[in-house]
Amino acid sequence: MAPSSERLFDSLGHFGRFQACVYFASVFQAMSCGIHYLASVFMAVTPNFVCGFPGNVSSILFHNSSASSIQDIWTLWTSADNYIVVQLENGEIWELDQCSRSKRKVSLDLAYEYKGNKSVFSCSDGFLYDDTKWKNTVVTQWDLVCDREWLAKLIQPTFMLGVLIGAVIFGDIADRLGRQRVIWFTSAGQFVFGIAVAFTFDYYSFVVVRFLLAMDFNILIILANMAGKFSIGVAFGLIYLYTAELYPTIVRSLAVGSGSMMCRVGSVVAPFCVYLRSVWIFMPLVHFSLLCLCILEMAAPRVAVVGAGVIGLSTALCIVETCPSSSVTVLSDQFSPNTTSDVAAGMLIPHTYPGTPIHVQKQWFKETFTYLFAISNSAEASEAGIHLVSGWQVFKSTPKEELPFWSDVVLGFRPMSEAELQKFPQHRFGQAFTTLKCDCPPYLLWLEKRLKATGVQMYNRKVADLWELHSEYDIVVNCTGIGAHQLVGDKKLFPVRGQVLQVHAPWVKHFIRDGDGLTYIYPGINRVTLGGTREKKSWSLLPDPGTTKDIFDRCCSLEASLQKAQDVKVKVGLRPSRQCVRLQREVLSQGELKLPVVHNYGHGAGGFSVHRGTAKEAAHLVGECIAALRGSSLRAKL
Ligand SMILES: Cc1cc2nc3c(=O)[nH]c(=O)nc-3n(C[C@H](O)[C@H](O)[C@H](O)COP(=O)(O)OP(=O)(O)OC[C@H]3O[C@@H](n4cnc5c(N)ncnc54)[C@H](O)[C@@H]3O)c2cc1C
């Protein structure tokens, strides 16, 4: 298979629900075929039999043995040339052959050998069958013996004729209308006729229904179609080569190897299925249900989320939660720990976006706070790296806005007391509150884990142009952070370089933030983040030693004990900044082709503070795209 197909699997998923459905649908179909093929051998068995007789029997003779019931004779029966002598309660003596019976003229003496006159009659009272081995076969049910024996012999040839005619007719139709429709149609036929055959009431309905069933063996049909409408026997074994196209290389040989045995498995279990009729009936039901699942999987809108920072991962999670019918894939050239989100301090203190109404920003923050607060109160808190932290925001002069818009979202917001302010002699005003902090790399890993648990696929891939995804996905969500500058050429997006230090100072338990937002001390679960810098339009990701010293000095002036901090690590990230977050729908088009895109980037210095709120809004926009897609496909069908 071409490498491009493997790349397709990278985005479609290697062996996901779709491939499992295809595999098991073909397994059940192949088994069902094997069973139906061999079933007639067991269904049309002709046991020992003799002509029936009119009336009640009083004694029975078979050579030298006498018996009171015909069942006792079958154990002595040796060949079809034998006959049985029965005396009826009315005194008549009959010789019962396989296809005729004779009534003796003289009925006084009951002997096996009789030389006197007798009248020969046809078997108008039916037949008596040996039911010691076969309780019931189509031969015994519909008396397919003697002059009707050829009807029994016709059962398998009519079935094979159905396969042949079906292969030619549907093979040709598949060429014209496409294989998918023919697979659907013939699978529905297998489903209906596979069950109907169990309810047939006479020989003719049985043969007709099996003929129609055989016509629907689409495995043969499609493969006959591929093999140039001949060599059905060879094609039959090739079903798994056909479906192999749908499996990635790592599982292909296993799927093909195990799958190709299934027809033989069907043949082996055929006698048991004939015996346990109900099992057999369920075969087409299972196959058909699995096929429906395949179609549902194929119909699921394919959503690609580009970007695996906090925005991409949380958006993917919200899409899975709000649009469960969709199939979500995350594509990114970097994952944790190599994203901007890994550098962030992760404090839930909103940054203000001048271009976005305050009530919208407050809503985003509130949703994010509520979501993370619930996690912080759960057993997941430590793994997700979420915890509550209390502290102070201090100002050198009283700010214009003493009560920020988010003051009633965080916990216990209040002005600092005089006693508290004494800790900060250079500051005149302060606010104390409790908020949440994400330890970013653990939180990103926790999001990834949740996504994988819901079946979301994640692939390492750099997207050069969103349009390149149009053939593989129905909807694209752009969460590329600062990467959107190049990816979609957004000139309103610019980097604000931030350098932070992460130090070991376990005694620092309260956060301290200078009101200008430039200097801050944010204690995490294991390390304390010291910041920071804001360098507009600087693209450099190299740490600057002069800045490191400056940050450290500024933080020590707020918290002198940090002089004793150890194990200093320096990190740099580019805040994806804009006047407002770009959270909107767009439809890319090239001629007739269209690709709905949802943008969710440009969170600047506050991505963690609002990520859940914006992710929910982006998921809502994805839901609108899905509804629009369904509407347009419905209109196209009408
Ligand atoms: C020093 C610093 C401190 C911060 N502190 C805080 C804080 O305390 N609180 C707070 O709320 N916010 C803070 N932030 C801001 C926060 O980090 C960002 O707002 C947030 O990380 C943005 O997330 P994102 O997912 O949009 O971007 P990123 O984390 O940069 O993720 C973008 C993803 O897109 C991928 N990508 C980009 N282009 C492509 C492409 N072409 N093809 C494929 N993949 C692509 C990237 O590989 C990456 O995976 C801080 C930022 C910095 C730099």
Image: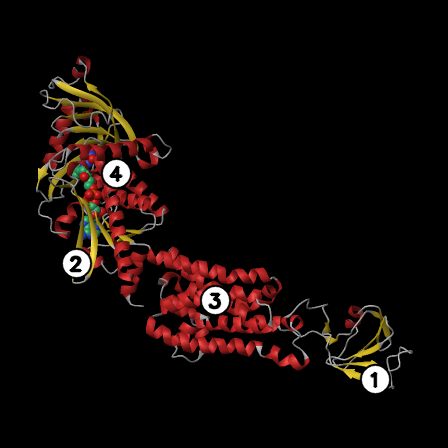
Confirm whether residue 508 shows in the render.
no
* Residue type (three-letter) at the residue carrying disc 2: Ser
Q: Which residue lies furthest to the right in this view?
A: 108
CA gap between label 2 and label 3 equals: 42 Å
Q: In which quarter of the image is the N terminus?
A: bottom left
Find residue 190 and name its label.
3
For label 3, the crowd category at 10 Å Cα-Cα, with few meaning under 14, some 14 to 19 and many 20 or more, is many
Give the distance between the C-alpha atoms of the residues marked 1 and 2, in whole angstroms.
94 Å
Earlier sequence position, callout 4 versus callout 3: 3
Nearer mark to the viewer, of 2 and 4: 2
Indicate the quadrant containing the C terminus: top left, top right, bottom left or bottom right.
bottom left
**Nearer to us in this view, 81 or 269:** 81
Which numbered mark, 1 or 2, is in the foreground of this view?
1
Tell me which corner region of the image, top left, top right, bottom left or bottom right, holds residue 154.
bottom right
Q: Earlier in the sequence, mark 1 or mark 3?
A: 1
Residue bearing mark 4 = 612
Q: Which mark is residue 118?
A: 1
User: Depth-wise, is mark 4 or mark 3 nearer the camera?
Assistant: 3
Q: Crowding near pointer 4: few (<14 within 10 Å), some, many (20+)?
A: many
The type of colouring in the image is secondary structure
Instruction: For residue 631, say whether it is visible.
Output: yes
Task: Name the residue beneath numbered marker 2.
Answer: 589
